[in-house]
Amino acid sequence: MQTRQRGSLARRVSHVGLDVLLGLGDLLGRLPPGWGYAMSRGLGLAVFHLARAERRKAMSHIAIAFPELSVSEHEAILRRCCQHLSWSGLEFAHLVHGGKDWVNSRIRVDGEQHVYAALAIGRGALYITGHIGNWEIQCAWAAQRMPLYPIARENASSGVTRRFLQVREHFGARSLLRERDQKTSVVRAAVEILSAGGVVGILMDQDLGGRGEFVPFFGKLAHTPGGPALLALMTGAPVLFGFSYREGRDRRGSFHRVVYYPPYFAHPGIEPAEAQARGLADPPTPLLASRPEAAQVAPEDIHRYTAFFTATIENAIRKAPEQWVWMHRRWRRQPSQHSPEATGPEAAPLAAAPTQTDQPEGR
């Protein structure tokens, strides 16, 4: 009980901190960009030096991911991470004040053709990404080019949730808001969107509670939502990965490169690497029954595709580790010998399916 109370208090403190950060970002966003970035950099360095508990936690996570690096190298990653996240708070204000013209002038895209190849199939797409780079700018760019529905988790601070959802909707993204007692309804909504040719956006690089799969992440088991794999296997929608990276800056702000990977189908009974090699050839037959909640997906398929998706995200993080959120307790849950998940995944009808959510508060 005490642990749960401490966790609840920590979340409330985190939400207050996010409110403050967004408020400061909004103020700095009204300054000339050069001034705003300089002051945001100072704010990030202050967080690095003053938030000692968060620093210790993040340093332990970086050490798990990069045991071959020295402590000073771990500190350098975290220092740049704090600066990057502070700049991202500033850029959220730029999204509000700068609008579509500002976003489109900041984004450079590799592999845009993969987006349109996935949509041309007519089954919608599962757009999987992580908290890498500035994912909100990535969302704002993508929502102008596809019918995007990011799955979102309601923040304990309703004001924070409202701000994120309003900005996303301004650019054309309509969020599926997941609440703790409505997990199954969100999955059903995602199935309907995919069936209508829409794109379901998913950030699957955090442990957000609920059921899931223990799969390797930087060499250590991490509890990971199995919902993305379930949806891909159940609906036959193509899987599209896209990641954002900060690179360079001019007088109007940072540039961000979004990299899209070739889409592919998740084939039941086939190893993910082989499915990836097939790409969009040989579309699988959807596993949906006349009633979606009756659809059955093999547990071993959910597990191996969840592991494969997670490995893809890990590889993307390795390209710019300072642009990931190392403060997140990614390895906080571990399998126990008494846990069903320790001996393998359970059968997964839709009604009991794990769901993946984007976490608007997860900056």
Image (spheres, rainbow, N blue to C red):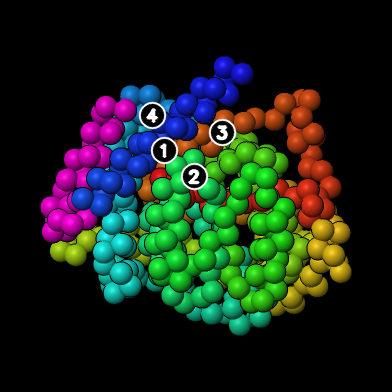
Label at residue 54? 4
Please identify the quarter of the rendering in which residue 163 is found.
bottom left
Whether residue 325 is situated above or below residue 95 in the rendered picture: above
Looking at the image, which is closer to me, 147 or 78? 147
Q: Which residue is mark 1?
A: 15
Using the numbered discs, state the Cα–Cα distance from disc 2 to disc 1 in whole angstroms: 8 Å
Answer with mark 4 or mark 3, whichever residue precedes in sequence.
Answer: 4
| Amino acid marked by disc 1 | His
Secondary structure beneath label 3: loop
Look at 46% across and 77% down and name the residue there. Answer: 145
Instruction: Tell me the magenta residue range.
Output: 28-51
Secondary structure beneath label 4: helix
Residue 292 is covered by the magenta coloring: no
Q: Is residue 300 visible in this depiction of the protein?
A: no
Q: Which residue is mark 2?
A: 155
Look at 67% across and 40% down and name the residue there. Answer: 210
Whether residue 164 is situated above or below residue 321 in the rendered picture: below
Q: Which residue is mark 3?
A: 331
